[in-house]
Image: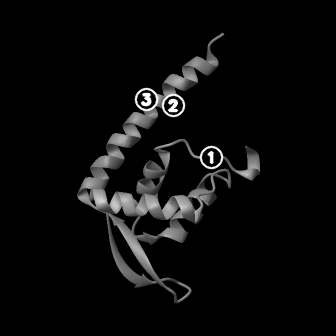
Amino acid sequence: MGKRGMDLLRGTLDLLVLRVLRSGPSHGYAIAKAIHATTDEVLNVEEGSMYPALYRMEKRGWIAADWGVTDTKRRAKFYQLTTEGRAQLDAESSSWNEFSTAVGKVLESS
């Protein structure tokens, strides 16, 4: 692991993206950069994972997209949480916390 990065567990990418978007609208590249920076460069989300996840979440109604212009003056699709997305974030956060607590108990047992 370390600075080389690690593969995301299946299903965690949606949770991470939704969490980043809780702070406000963002485009795919910025979302990936935020995840990378927030995790002290441990998690690296590639385009091949990010954009299919964004399209899937948009189709499910968790996020909505509008075209805009980035800080570097490039045209990009900006994604934001919907009401359904906020509910999904709450549900997934709760499940993740329960899961990570359970795994931690196993790792700490003798």
Report the amino acid beneath label 3. Answer: Glu
Residue 109, horizontal then vertical, whole percent? 62, 13
- Image height of 108 relative to 15, above or below: above
Mark 2, residue position:
100
Mark 3, residue position:
98
Q: Nearer the viewer, residue 100 or 9?
A: 9
Report the amino acid beneath label 1. Answer: Asp
Residue 58, horizontal then vertical, whole percent? 33, 62
- Image height of 8 relative to 70, above or below: above
Q: Earlier in the sequence, mark 2 or mark 1?
A: 1
CA separation, marks 2 and 3? Answer: 6 Å
Numbered badge on residue 7: 1
Numbered badge on residue 17: none
Residue at 39 percent across and 63 percent down: it is: 55
Q: Earlier in the sequence, mark 1 or mark 3?
A: 1
Q: Is residue 43 left or right of residue 77?
A: right
Q: Is residue 35 left or right of residue 62?
A: right
Kindly state the secondary structure of the residue where label 2 is placed.
helix
CA separation, marks 1 and 3? Answer: 21 Å
Residue at 59 percent across and 65 percent down: it is: 33
